[in-house]
Amino acid sequence: MGRAYIGTRLIALTLTFVFFVTGCDGGNINPETKAPMKVPKSETPAKDQITIGFSMDTLKEERWLKDRDLFKEEAEKLGAKVEIMEADGDDALQIVQAEELISKGVDVLVVVPFNAESTASIVNKAHIAGIKVISYDRLIKNADIDLYISFDNERVGELQAEAMTKLVPKGKYVYIGGAETDNNAHLFKKGVFNILKPFIESGDITVVFDQWTENWTPANAYANMEAALGANHNQIDAVIAANDATAGGAIKALELQGLKGKIPIAGQDAELAAAKRIVEGTQIMTVYKPIRSLAKTAAELAVKVAKGKKIETDRKVNNGKIEVPSVLLTPIAVDKLNIDETIIKDGFHSREEVYQ
């Protein structure tokens, strides 16, 4: 009796153990055979989706709306989720928003800095959290950023000045700069003066006005242009503006003096308003930076960085602290002669929009 009882107990315990194990297998039991079913691979938990934090300075200008939409579109094609925050040109707010993205645990942080210097704190905080940082279009200064993706912005300024000096090789020049807090504004200006320098040294060109435009606003550019006209009794031969928005502000000041279309002005960004002005003859050129290429490249590299892949680049840019691995795309000068073959052909703006 004792042995039979023990044998019965062993069988019961074995059956209990089998049912316990199969029960722990997520309840995947064949209802007919009572045997465990193999879980298909498709039902196993997938790797968490990559999340990219995109901290943007502003969306007030047309081009940044394009950057936002194109970057999101390209990143989502790659299976990533994009968390976008826009600081409306507020330095402190951008830092707070970036901290929020970091606290959410994004896999990589992409930053369009408002202030090239103060956003260094964003990089430090992201790195403490183990998050890598990509500087998009504008360079973050004095920080250990992991990657910089932009256009050759010094070349942008050179293209502006090359076009203007061909048209006006002698005379009084006005330079309407961008925001002093933006590193790109310094690069644009450097490029412009790379070309102007020999003309200035020979005495052919005199720069009679050279001012930054606070926050890049057309209103501040208008005030700068108004001051330049007043200081020179309207005797100005050429204007180079740091972007199309500032060019637009300057043109309004020229218009009030009856000088719209009479004093040539150059811009950059290939905004729709600038394209229309080129067609009508009130702006001589702009610089087209194919934003889809920038957004696509940035999205692809952001996903790779988030996955821990090493990025090899053939360029480096010094940001005051380190030589930052950089990807710099090529800008294109656009005027009335090639507008159809560039921004219209690329679909950046439609022919109907440009020619109304």
Image: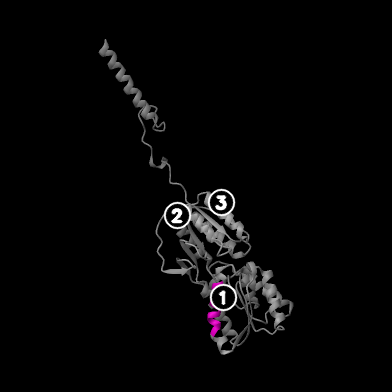
Disc 1 secondary structure class? helix
Q: Is 136 positioned to the left or the right of 283 in the image?
A: left
Q: Looking at the picture, which amino acid does disc 2 mark?
A: Ala
Q: Which quadrant does the N terminus fall into? A: top left
The circle on residue 100 is: 3
At 73% from the left edge and 79% from the top edge, which residue is drawn? 257
State which quadrant residue 280 falls in.
Answer: bottom right
- Residue 158 position (above or below residue 31): below
Q: Residues in magenta? A: 186-197
Farthest residue, direction left: 3
Q: Looking at the picture, which amino acid does disc 1 mark?
A: Lys
Location of mark 1 (residue): 189
Residue 82 position within the rendered picture, expressed as x and y whole percent measured from the top left: 53, 53
At 33% from the left edge and 23% from the top edge, which residue is drawn? 15
User: In this orientation, does residue 355 appear?
Assistant: no
Q: Looking at the picture, which amino acid does disc 3 mark?
A: Glu
Disc 3 secondary structure class? helix
Location of mark 2 (residue): 306
